[in-house]
Image (cartoon, coloured by chain):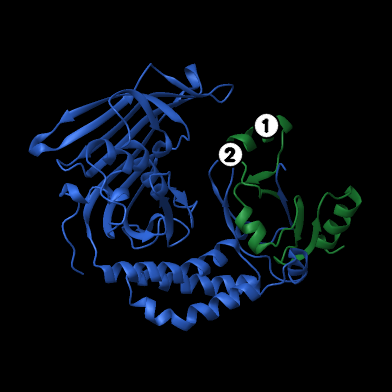
């Protein structure tokens, strides 16, 4: 599952436009700046966290990532 | 506290912010000599409406002498006892008859600022065509108004300004915003002191079938006002000067060393000021200092802090999704999850 969390406090309408224009399928959460910067220690956007099925953080990729890097992290999360 | 009745006596009209403005006083009554600069306290009831959102609170404002003018120090309290913003204290410096200069301006509690600035701007106006400050209804621009004065019972009078020259386009383009209605009503006592004020605006977003109407209002009512003894004035001043540097450190989120220094200074005389007129604020600042210290003692680099998260349970959160539905991390228990934090910039 992918949760996309907007951590830049962009407005709901602007995000809606973005989602529609790009036909994004993942669930989009708003106003995640507090959660992101305080609880998840973001430094730059985008940052991706992988959480395994037991709810533990297994990987963090900060900044734009190559597909390979993301796949590596995902495998870690899946325990492969 | 012993206090004299507020500003019903026209000699006290220059107790400006809470009642009347310097500019207005000069046109109506003679401005008293500058060296007379008594201290005063007033309590106002504030009600702010922004579409669906309604905010109500009471604000206590002290006016204390400051070099070249005076300072207003305020504290706002919601009906439930909390502060309707992020910070427990704010202040404005007014030098001579100039525009108020925010010092420890609290961006999270703009209602108080709006009230003070608007009252300041509004009472300087004459009759006939003029301009009103849009700040009270959240528009930082001048709005053309037609002004008139209406006599009320008991010698009171109202100054009324209403939108002149038809609709005002605030913003054009695809997300247009138009003001279709605006009014500013100030109720003054016979002595010229402001008793209440009300700003109302109707805004229309978008056009034609997509148009949405939004009502905005700022209503303030004076609950009490009076002069305060020189001694109390000095206590407010001292408390403010005691709190100001600490508050500055807290607001800027400085280094651990700075927070600790502020804490040391604060704790040295905290007990004395807790008994003073700003005692409640002192207590709140103590709590804020604690939180600040905790945050400041974490490593500065988020990447370093994040390293500790690997292998640990993911921090719980609940956020709204794009359709307004609440989503918790908990909802996805047992699933492998990718959290993508993103932003435009």
Q: Nearer the viewer, residue B11 or B137?
A: B11
Query: Relative to B38, does residue B11 appear above or below in the rendering?
Result: above
Q: Where residue A12 is drawn, which disc sits there?
A: 2
From the image, which quarter does the C terminus of chain B lie in?
Answer: top right
- Horizontal side of residue B220 vs A74, given as left or right: left
Chain A's colour is green
- Label 1 sits on residue: A20
Can you see residue A1? no
Q: Are marks 2 and 1 on the same chain?
A: yes
**Residue plotted at (50% across, 22% down):** B210
In-image side of B10 versus B23 (left or right): left
Closer to us: mark 2 or mark 1? Answer: 2
Q: Residue B58: horizontal and vertical position, in percent?
A: 31, 55
Q: Residue at the spot x=59%, y=49% of the render?
A: A31
Q: Quadrant of residue B203?
A: top left
Question: Between residues B214 and A18, which one lies in front from this camera angle?
Answer: B214
Q: Chain B appears what colour? A: blue
The first of marks 2 and 1 along the sequence is: 2
Point 66% across, 45% down: residue: A27
Residue B210 visible to an observer of this rendering: yes
Q: Position of residue B156 (x, y in %)?
A: 14, 38
Q: CA distance from mark 2 to mark 1?
A: 12 Å
Q: Chain of mark 2?
A: A
Element at label 2:
helix
């Amino acid at each position: 599952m992918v949760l996309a969390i907007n951590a830049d406090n962009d407005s709901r309408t602007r995000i809606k436009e973005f989602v529609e224009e790009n036909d994004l399928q993942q669930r989009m959460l708003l106003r995640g700046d507090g959660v992101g910067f305080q609880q998840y220690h973001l430094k730059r956007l985008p940052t991706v966290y992988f959480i395994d099925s037991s709810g533990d953080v297994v990987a963090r990729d900060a900044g734009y990532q190559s597909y390979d890097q993301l796949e590596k992290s995902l495998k870690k999360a899946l325990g492969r | 506290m012993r206090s004299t009745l507020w500003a019903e006596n026209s000699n006290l009209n220059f107790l400006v912010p809470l009642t009347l403005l310097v500019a207005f006083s000069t046109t109506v009554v003679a401005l008293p000599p500058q060296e007379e600069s008594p201290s005063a306290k007033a309590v106002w009831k504030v009600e702010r409406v922004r579409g669906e959102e309604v905010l109500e609170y009471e604000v206590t404002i002290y006016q204390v002498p400051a070099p070249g003018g005076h300072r207003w120090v305020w504290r706002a309290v919601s009906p439930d006892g909390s502060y309707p913003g992020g910070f427990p204290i704010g202040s404005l410096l007014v030098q001579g008859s100039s525009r108020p200069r925010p010092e420890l301006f609290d961006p999270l509690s703009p209602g108080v600022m709006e009230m003070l600035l608007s009252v300041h701007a509004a009472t300087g106006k004459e009759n006939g065509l003029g301009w009103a400050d849009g700040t009270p209804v959240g528009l930082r621009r001048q709005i053309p108004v037609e002004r008139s004065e209406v006599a009320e019972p008991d010698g009171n009078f109202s100054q009324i300004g209403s939108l002149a020259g038809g609709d005002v386009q605030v913003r054009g383009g695809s997300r247009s915003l138009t003001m279709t209605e605006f009014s500013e009503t100030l109720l003054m006592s016979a002595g010229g002191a402001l008793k209440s004020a009300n700003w109302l605006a109707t805004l229309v977003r978008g056009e034609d079938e997509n148009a949405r109407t939004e009502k905005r209002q700022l209503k303030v009512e004076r609950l009490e006002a009076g002069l305060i003894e020189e001694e109390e004035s000095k206590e407010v001043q001292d408390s403010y000067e005691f709190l100001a540097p600490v508050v500055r450190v807290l607001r800027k989120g400085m280094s651990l060393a700075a927070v600790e220094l502020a804490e040391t200074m604060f704790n040295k005389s905290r007990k004395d000021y807790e008994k003073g007129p700003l005692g409640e604020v002192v207590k709140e600042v103590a709590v804020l200092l604690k939180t600040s210290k905790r945050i400041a003692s974490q490593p500065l680099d988020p990447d370093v802090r994040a390293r500790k998260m690997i292998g640990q349970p993911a921090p719980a959160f609940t956020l709204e999704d794009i359709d307004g539905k609440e989503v918790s991390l908990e909802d996805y228990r047992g699933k492998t999850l990718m959290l993508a934090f993103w932003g435009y910039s």
